[in-house]
Image (cartoon, rainbow, N blue to C red):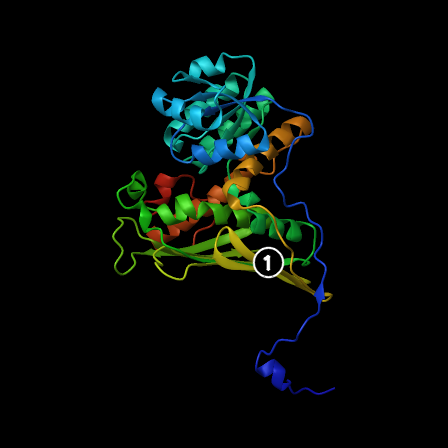
Amino acid sequence: MSDTPSEEAYALKSAETRLVAAPDLAYLPPRPKAYAPRIALVGAGGISFAHLDAYRNAGFDVAVICNRTLAKAAERRDEFFPDAAITDDLGEVLARDDIEVLDITTHPAERAGMIEKALLAGKHVLSQKPYVLDLDTGERLADLADRKGAKLAVNQNGRWAPHLAWMREAVRTGQIGDLVSCHVSIHWNHGWIKGTPFEAIDDLVLYDFGVHWFDFLASLVGDRTTSVYATRARAAGQEARPPLLAQALVEFDGGQASLCLDGATPFGPQDRTYISGTGGSLSSVGPDLGNQAMELTTASGTARPALSGSWFNDGFAGTMGELLSAIEDGREPLNGARGNLQSLALTFAAIASTHRGISVVPGTVRSLAEAQRSTG
């Protein structure tokens, strides 16, 4: 046995692998078996089009659309659910015995109070992301849901983006052994926010956008994360107000993760995810979130699953479908609010790190406001 490394080892030369069949993994958006409640959408602005389009395609029953500007509710109704009622009164929605589930899509500052009222009225709730502005409020609402026997989930729709869902299930089912690393790099043009309300969000890239990938990481490692170090910067030539560049290094027991967000890439966009484990690796790469080529490589060879669906709008069907399935089965949703606090803890820690210039332990920063202060 030689103690001299081979030329291949020095050169980091890879060995060819044979093509094998991909495992059959449960990555598609879930559907309840028989439970078909009447749903109310609260907040008909912004991203609500994606919710309603997904629900229509999935056959979910949206019976009410509630919005403070009634004309907007009417516009969404006419486009997606012509038979739905419209109202500008949340109390009217909560008083209806036939409405069992609320999808609350408003901004987080006003949403927490709406969630509380809905839970007190005995309704199940899907909350838009980011779930809350502070972890204590999130815990209190999750506790209230438990006391009322209601299910509270968060619209982390990236969990059912086909490539992310397939990789999550591959990790969960042990396809790559014990998780060692997860690295995400996304290069795209986020300059479209100029002149929109999104410009008012100072930590936009990590908070509103990056929360999808902090949530993806949390779905892989749970509460094993030990520290986060992050930076942010304005890109040369960018016109939008908030910094469009951000990156985060995350340590967890037995491994590491990184998130690189280049939101000022006008040409040649790329979205890449690489996950390694003790028994294999996963990779997904493409020009955007909807076009990804997947590979799973193990000792048996390389599998290239052909995935169906797309993030928009299957991801939105997934969040509601998982909530309805959890209600039907009497279990906690995969996108449950309590579990989502791990995702928010990572997000707040990353934001705090950019302001303080130090590593931050997830969970020690309890709110967005605290994260944005330069000292702890």
Q: Quadrant of the N terminus?
A: bottom right
**In percent of the image, x 47 and y 36: which residue is there?**
50
Q: How many marks?
A: 1
Is 294 drawn above or below residue 103 in the view shown? Answer: below
Relative side of 328 to 105, left or right: right
Dividing the picture into quarters, in which one does residue 279 lie? bottom right
| Location of residue 321 in the rendering, given as x and y in whole percent from the top left corner | 60, 33
In this picture, is 6 found above or below 365?
below
Determine the image quadrant of residue 74.
top left
Q: Position of residue 250 (x, y in %)?
A: 49, 56
Asked whether 117 or 100 is in front, the reply is 100
> Judging from the image, what secondary structure is the residue with disc 1 in?
strand
Front residue of 4 and 61: 61
Q: Which residue is mark 1?
A: 294
Crowd band around label 1 with a 10 angstrom C-alpha radius: few (<14), some (14–19), many (20+): many
Taking the spot 40% from the left edge, 45% from the top edge, the residue there is: 207
Q: Is residue 149 left or right of residue 50?
A: right
Q: What residue type is disc 1 on?
A: Met
Looking at the picture, does residue 209 appear above or below residue 22?
Answer: above
Q: Position of residue 370 (x, y in %)?
A: 36, 41
The residue shown at (49%, 12%) is 95
From this view, report whether residue 204 is shown above or below residue 107.
Answer: below
Q: Is residue 278 visible?
A: no
Residue at point 36%, 54% (across, down): 189
User: Visible in this render: residue 350?
Assistant: yes
